[in-house]
Amino acid sequence: MTVVGSDSLAALLADKSVLPDGWRPVFERVAREEFVPDRVWPEDGDVVVDRRRDPKAWRAAVYSDRALVTQWDDGRHAGDGAGRLATSSASAPSTVAEMLFDLDAHPGMRVLEIGTGTGYSAALLAARGCEVVSVEIDPELAEQARANLARAGYGDAVRVLTGDGTLGHPGAGPYDRVQVTAGVRRIPAAWIEQARPGAVIVMPWGTDHTTGDCSLRLVVDADGRSASGPFTMATAFMKLRRQRPDRRHYGAASLPSDWAEAAVASTTSLGWNDVVAGPFDPVGFVLGLHVPDCLAQPAPDGHGGGTLWLHAADTGHGHSTAAAGFAPGHTPNILQSGPRRLWDEVETAWCWWDGQGRPTVHDFGLTATLTTTTDTAAVEQLAWYRDRNHPLAPLVHDVRPASTATVSTGA
Ligand SMILES: C[S@@+](CC[C@H](N)C(=O)[O-])C[C@H]1O[C@@H](n2cnc3c(N)ncnc32)[C@H](O)[C@@H]1O
């Protein structure tokens, strides 16, 4: 009989070649079972695995290379079924290992982690000899992580703070490494301000064109005012609480009933499968990089087609909306309204991507630059193709009132 435990998990990750140098003993030492709660939903599955009812299945899930959902709907969901939105998890061990590879943390380094969750990745960093400050927005999860870390022997090496991680924790900086384990749409100023020049910042980053993310590895410039680097892999994380749109509010239901009559009609040579892809597919990611400040919401019809809704917020001249309707055997029907022609922007971006030979996420990167005034601290996000001298259109920025610039999170 195979014994499942941290040794077998470390061996599994070594077989997958995802363990960074020096990390195998760390994965062997830190027992994932100390961090995983009794009730989990493997990989967004809709059935709970409960340790008390089926300890063997629970242990197999813990030592598998699967993400385990540990919270739904910010803790408001009860029961054995899945909730609406997964809001915390123990990330898949290979994803944790791949992020650690990008982070390149060494013993003695000061690490800021955003999104403590179970505390497992913070424990790995502590077991590697790092000094860790980890910020978790959910008070119950933070409390549970503190208990997990103390029980596993990392209570002194990891400081868990309850608060909004977008503010970081200036009190313990400057940091050598910043690891973010929640999906980011707008990089907050605090992470660059609190990192030392040369520091590495790793985060799952994406746009509202898809629900997926890409791991982004930034290195802070010598002047400490900007950070730049490539996307390294497609992934999907729960988003930072204040940066997740409620997708139920988009689509046909959000529009007046006479919207279609007032919209401008056209058609396209593209099809549903060209522009609607899975969260790990590069096309959605690349379209999001090219069409800034736009939320895409596909509504499949279950017959190989559907409507791709595109929405852009009002920036002073009204909202923009587009609906691209596709049905097999029929000419696509495009409707657009508002100051921006969102479908035209998407189609232009798709043709560019196709014309370039359909580059993958690894061909892109991003530069985040701090711009501070007396009233605000903003981060300009500029995605680029191949190198930072080839920027795409500016993306949505994070702007923080200066009054919150020094707010730290309390334990
Ligand atoms: C994927 S889980 C983190 C996994 C974790 N690192 C582990 O090893 O178990 C994402 C976490 O980010 C937290 N989170 C979301 N928004 C946050 C924010 N603004 N500040 C701090 N934590 C946040 C969520 O509550 C959730 O626990």
Image (cartoon, helix red, strand yellow):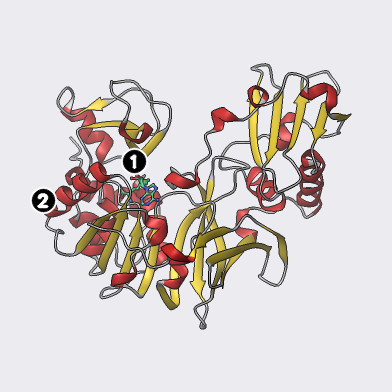
Q: Amino acid at mark 1?
A: Ser
Question: Which quadrant: the C terminus?
Answer: bottom left
Q: Which residue is mark 2?
A: 151
Q: Position of residue 11 (x, y in %)?
A: 28, 51
The answer to which image quadrant residue 317 occupies is: top right
- Of residues 96 and 113, which is closer to you in this image? 113
* Total number of numbered discs in the rendering: 2
Of pointers 2 and 1, the one earlier in the residue sequence:
1
Spatial CA distance of label 2 from label 1 is 19 Å
User: Which residue is found at the position 26% from the left and 75% from the top?
Assistant: 108
Say what secondary structure mark 2 lies in: helix
Is 312 left, or right, of 182 in this rendering? right
User: Which residue is found at the position 64% from the left and 53% from the top?
Assistant: 360
Can residue 34 be seen from the camera position used here? yes
**How many residues crowd around disc 1 within 10 Å: few (fewer than 14), some, or many (20 or more)?**
many
Q: Position of residue 335 (x, y in %)?
A: 81, 29
Q: Amino acid at mark 2?
A: Arg
Seen in the picture, residue 223 relative to 28 is either above or below; the reply is below
Q: Which residue is mark 1?
A: 89
User: Which residue is found at the position 18% from the left and 65% from the top?
Assistant: 157
The answer to which image quadrant residue 238 occupies is: top left
Seen in the picture, residue 306 relative to 127 is either above or below; the reply is above
User: Which residue is found at the position 49% from the left and 52% from the top?
Assistant: 184
Is 108 left, or right, of 205 in this rendering? left
